[in-house]
Amino acid sequence: MAHNTDNNNTLFERAKQIIPGGVNSPVRAFKAVGGTPRFIQRAQGAHFWDANDQRYIDYIGSWGPMILGHGHPAVVQAVQAAVREGFSFGAPTEREIELAQEILRLLPSMDMVRLVSSGTEAAMSAIRLARGATGRSKLIKFEGCYHGHADALLVKAGSGLATFGNATSAGVPPEVVQHTLVLEYNNIAQLEEAFTLHGTGIACLMIEPIAGNMNFVRASLPFMKRCRELCTQYGALLVFDEVMTGFRVALGSAQSVYARHLPGFEPDMTVMGKVIGGGMPLAAFGAKRAVMELLAPLGAVYQAGTLSGNPVATACGLATLREISKPGFFEDLSAKTRSLVAGLKAAAAAEGVPFSADSEGGMFGFFLFDSLPQNYATVMTTDSKRFNTLFHGLLDRGIYIAPALYEAGFVSAAHTSDDIAATVAAAREVFKLL
Ligand SMILES: *Cc1c(COP(=O)(O)O)cnc(C)c1O
């Protein structure tokens, strides 16, 4: 039986009067799946409670940041101590150095890092820096990858490789996206053709190494290898957008997963967010020293932020990174996530539902068809009606997954084997309805 959503409805009605769509970020609105968004009152560990005091097992974790679960004592303590010392100074603090050191220790592909406040800001700044460093304008992105909502990145593929992208949002002038080339993920032939045509004008290739904004799609090893080779050959920067995968799929992030298979593999620049803020607004981008020293105040590439390196956010991020650096953390998290994925697969098989799923570290994705998709077009062939039945079936049973079929899921260290078992049992009930 569906839960009573009265208080959620009341809040949604109030919100819609004064906040566009009732939400401050579109996917929260349940537009894709229908129904009333749950307004969250509080959270603890792997659970949150909505305005009707209904409890949910949380598989979005604030879309990734809450890798320790909600209200981890060490993080809460660090944030409380920081708040007492002051919210923001507009002058540098030691904690910014400590967080930068911690990030650089975990990601040896970078020598220097700049802290900002959102993934969008980090990706936007990384592109400006790549353009400044190369003196070139063009950039490559892939269909289905999300890099925040900077103008130049809100683009879909044009009609052919010789033409550049079309804006996916109103308010983005065509001139602003004329330098953005949108290619199909995992398509090596197209990538090679694009470099042959435009290579000497390309400032950077930006990619989600494991794409979490088209559910969960890995860049294949041969594809990633080719991205690296072509960027090196043509002098373009390979920019890893690890806002989602960073410190989430492995302690060394997705770049360490690729380096396991491609010895010596490194991106030229990395964009981070989500987990490094531990749930507070914090993001970053980093690269080798020669590139990073082109940033203001040293160099000619301008970049700034009133709240950048915020003392409370850095305390939260630092405490989070210290917890996930503890021995065995990722082994446990990965095992937990794999057990969820295995349980869901078994439940789907038992009910005869076509299903495929994958995970890395604490990030997972599943599809209502037999094999794992390689690109956005295939992801979007998912039957959205079936997905919506699954989403609402789980929601009614107290399981909260992303309210859109093109989003990844997240397991935290706070999820217990009971949480996983309850999720698999609920999923099996819902699979019967499909
Ligand atoms: C979430 C996300 C962003 C945008 O970060 P915001 O903090 O929401 O601006 C960029 N890139 C990727 C891969 C993301 O998952």
Image (spheres, rainbow, N blue to C red):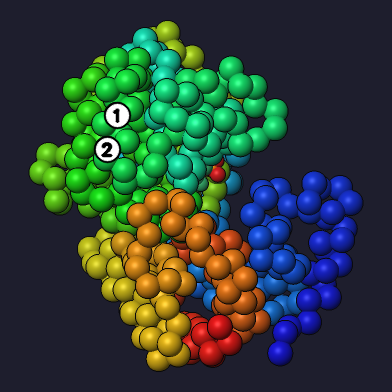
**Looking at the picture, does residue 363 appear above or below residue 58?**
above
- Measuring from the top left, give residue 232's x and y in whole percent: 20, 25
Residue that extends furthest to the left in the rendered view of this protein: 263
- Measuring from the top left, give residue 151's x and y in whole percent: 58, 28
Q: Is mark 1 within 8 Å of ligand 1?
A: no
Question: Residue, x 41% and y 20% (percent of image)?
Answer: 138
- Disc 2 on helix, strand or loop? helix
Neighbour class for label 1 at 10 Å: few (<14), some, many (≥20)? Answer: few
Which corner quadrant of the image does residue 267 belong to? top left
Q: Indicate left or right for 193 with 313 as reference.
A: left
Question: Residue, x 34% and y 68% (percent of image)?
Answer: 371
Q: Amino acid at mark 2?
A: Ala
Neighbour class for label 2 at 10 Å: few (<14), some, many (≥20)? Answer: few
Provide the residue designation for mark 1: 193
Question: Residue, x 56% and y 83% (percent of image)?
Answer: 434
Residue that extends furthest to the front in the rendered view of this protein: 159
Which corner quadrant of the image does residue 393 belong to? bottom right
Residue in the foreground of this view, choosing between 242 and 236: 236
Instruction: Say if residue 183 shows up in the picture.
Output: yes
Q: Indicate left or right for 62 with 233 as reference.
A: right
**Looking at the picture, does residue 66 appear above or below residue 133?**
below
Q: Tags 2 and 1 in contact by the CB under 8 Å rule?
A: yes
Provide the residue designation for mark 2: 189
Q: What is the distance, in whole Å, between disc 2 and disc 1 at their CAs?
A: 6 Å
Residue in the foreground of this view, choosing between 264 and 184: 184
